[in-house]
């Protein structure tokens, strides 16, 4: 048992997206992990790499899931690099409320850097599913 305190979630948003219960753009899906296109783009092509099984934190992953996630994280990074040709790629992951984890389902963020470097931590517009589908289509050409 881990000692991390994770956010409460009556229903897990990522599980709903993966089940198709709520609309969301899925760039790629395998048996243990998937790549989602979030509606809040904090970089130039911002993606989420998630486990397909509900696992709240890094401490809850099975070894095969950890390997699957890292493999997709690298593939997502290469797709961003080939498509958007950014001078940097940011990768981040949070575990527990004290680490600013917002959704209690393990995930990595990966994003091409914005002008001036880093990612956008300010308010960003929420894109439509049509717009995130377009991002996915652009990236699929280099996936």
Image (cartoon, rainbow, N blue to C red):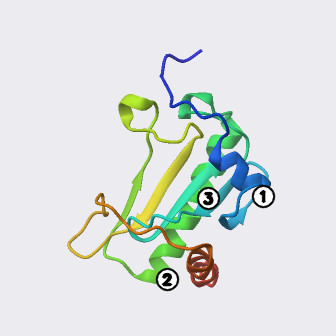
Tell me the SS state at disc 1: loop
Q: CA separation, marks 1 and 2?
A: 27 Å
Residue 72 got which mark?
3
Horizontally, residue 121 falls left or right of residue 55, namely left
Q: For the residue labelled by badge 3, is the local secondary structure a helix, a strand or a loop? A: helix
At a point 48% along the width and 22% down the height, the residue shown is 4
Q: Position of residue 27 (x, y in %)?
A: 66, 69
Tag 2 secondary structure: helix
- Sort mark 1 into few (<14), some (14-19) or many (20+) by Cα contacts within 10 Å: few
Residue found farthest to the left? 116
Which of the two residues, 89 or 109, is positioned nearer the viewer here?
A: 109
- In this view, 5 is above or below 112: above
Tell me the quarter of the image containing the N terminus. top right
Which of 17/99 is in front? 17
**Residue 51 in sight here:** no
Ranked by sequence position, the earlier of labels 2 and 3 is 3
User: Earlier along the polypeptide chain: callout 1 or callout 2?
Assistant: 1
Badge 2, how many Cα within 10 Å: few under 14, some, many 20+? some
Which circle marks residue 20 in the picture?
1
Q: Which residue is mark 2?
A: 83
Q: Is residue 115 above or below residue 30?
A: below
Give the number of the mark in front: 1 or 2: 1
Question: Is residue 50 shown above or below 10?
Answer: below
Residue drawn at x 49%, y 81% as measured from the top left: 82
Quick one: quadrant of the C terminus? bottom right
Lower position in the chain sequence, tag 3 or tag 1: 1
The part of the image, by quadrant, that contains residue 59 is: top right
């Amino acid at each position: 048992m881990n000692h991390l305190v994770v956010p409460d979630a009556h229903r897990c948003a990522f599980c709903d997206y993966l089940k198709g219960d709520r609309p969301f753009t899925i760039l790629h899906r395998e048996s243990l992990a998937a790549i989602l296109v979030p509606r809040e783009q904090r970089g130039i092509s911002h993606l989420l790499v998630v486990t397909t099984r509900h696992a709240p934190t890094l401490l809850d992953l099975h070894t095969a899931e950890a390997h699957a996630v890292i493999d997709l994280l690298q593939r997502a990074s290469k797709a961003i690099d080939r498509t958007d040709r950014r001078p940097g790629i940011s990768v981040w992951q949070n575990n527990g409320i004290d680490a600013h984890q917002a959704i209690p389902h393990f995930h990595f963020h990966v994003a091409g850097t914005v002008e001036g470097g880093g990612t956008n931590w300010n308010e960003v517009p929420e894109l439509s599913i049509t717009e995130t589908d377009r991002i996915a289509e652009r990236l699929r050409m280099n996936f």
